[in-house]
Image (cartoon, rainbow, N blue to C red):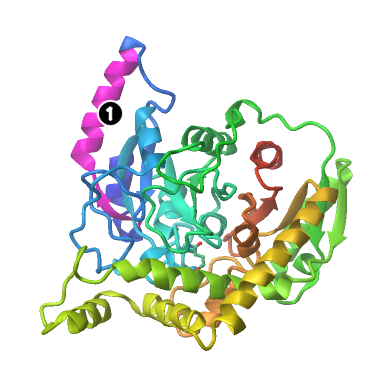
Amino acid sequence: HYLQNIESNQHLNAFVEVYADEAREAAIAVDEKITNGTAGRLAGLVIGLKDVLSHKGHGLQAGSQILKNYQAPFNATAVQRLLDEDAIVIGRQNCDEFAMGSSNENSSFGPVLNAADPTKVPGGSSGGSAVAVQAGLCHASLGSDTGGSVRQPAAFCGVIGVKPSYGRISRYGLIAYASSFDCIGPITKSVADAALLIEIMAGADNFDSTVSVNEVPAYSRNLEWSGKARIGYIRESVESEAIAPDIRQQTSDLLNRLRAEGHEVTPVEIPLVDSLLPTYYILTTAEASSNLSRFDGVRYGHRSAEASDLESLYKKTRTEAFGNEVRRRILLGTFVLSANYYDAYYTKAQRVRRLVQEETSRFFEQFDFLISPVTPTTAFTIGEKTEDPLQMYLADIFTVQANVVGNPAVAVPNGSDENGMPIGIQIMAPYFGELKMLAFAQYLT
Ligand code: GLN
């Protein structure tokens, strides 16, 4: 069924590679296990992996030419845990190069098209993963979220995307973009599926020292919401002219519904909101410039044929094989880490990050959830923002806070605009507050 759907939707460009024969064989093997009564909890679940997750013996390129012909020599912990429960991996999915982008236009495999309107972007960076679920090309996808890359494409495509707390799911085997922000997260059609996937992937792992040893609650069996929630929302998100009118309307309709259902709904100020994007883009580019230094033409993938010495090997390899956005961010990151500017940018951004963390913790002493739109606009037209990176970065205004502070957040569909393009609502919860957050998300859907 899914292989046929992939075949008839090739124009969407959601998959970089499809493992048709392997998936068929896996399905037959799982079928046998079901007959024998030995099948795992994900038996029959057909999953796609964003092209940043290691899957042993399969190609892995992070949407880039610099990793051309690279094959993952091991499984990411998250992938291994899904396979152990008999999930079937159907292919790897198109994404922005090294997960840098908000529209999937930075992929060396070309843009992905939004299935709701193929002239529009699917969002990014996990665009292929969101479209694959939206268009029924697989049951669920795994994406990665450094600043919104699971939630923003989920919102643009009308599906569910969860960014768990930082450290909830091991990052082992995830190609690093910004290590102190990166989270693996599921994209699904139901909250129950997302809850089950997180439950299976989460928890202690000897291969990632930043993963939490906190016990993993049975998210999937606790999705009944009861009681009244204390909800804060940013006033601008329903008032500011900078937010598309249909999004303001749908958001305020939802808040009114929640009020009518007896929840406490309060407008709040987030004083540091203007600092979120600068902080995010300074710290993530700094970390990226360091993480991406390993792609030097010696160890992996592409190697320039034009090089005459070691220095030119590095330069030519990286110039030939990295795309524009990746180069821009390596340059920016190298600049903010350079001796003369380190304190002015990097140190200062670290301080602001701490302040935002403190402010957010104080917020969650009073509230259960922070609710906002996921994005200021619905999916935009392909090509519309490619010339203006700052415009593109603004697409992340609501999503980056969760990554700056490490908290979990979920994007849930909340109607559509006048052209039928999906709108999403974001619920952000306290650190390690996935259990209540998922139950509330279920209640909203
Ligand atoms: N759009 C954001 C960026 O370009 C988020 C990317 C992500 O979460 N990987 O950095």
Look at the image and say whether residue 2 sits in the magenta stretch: no
Q: Residue furthest bottom?
A: 340
Q: Is residue 55 above or below residue 32?
A: below
Q: Secondary structure at mark 1?
A: helix
Residue for badge 1: 27
The answer to which of 210 and 33 lies nearer the viewer is: 210
Which residue is painted at 70% across and 29% down in the image?
224
Where is residue 354 shown, x and y percent of the image? 68, 64
Q: Which residue of the protein is positioned furthest toward the front in this rendering?
A: 339
- In front: 393, or 262? 393
Q: Which residues are magenta?
A: 14-35
What residue is rendered at 25% in x and 52% in y? 17
Q: Is residue 102 left or right of residue 378?
A: left
Along the line of sight, the residue nearer the viewer: 357 or 91: 357
Can the viewer see residue 247? no
- Residue 121: x %, y % from top left: 46, 67
Residue type at numbered disc 1: Ala
Q: From this view, report whether residue 234 is shown above or below residue 414.
A: below
Q: Is residue 24 magenta?
A: yes
Instruction: Kindly report the secondary structure that dominates the magenta region of the rendered protein.
Output: helix
Query: Residue most toward the top?
Result: 36
Going by the image, does 244 lie left or right of 327? Answer: right
Is residue 279 toward the left or the right of residue 210 in the image?
right
| Quadrant (top left, top right, bottom left, bottom right) of the C terminus | top right
Task: Indicate the quadrant where residue 325 lies.
Answer: bottom left
165 shown above or below 271: above
Q: Residue at x 52, y 59 (%)?
A: 180
Residue 185 in view of the camera: yes
Q: Is residue 437 above or below residue 227?
A: below
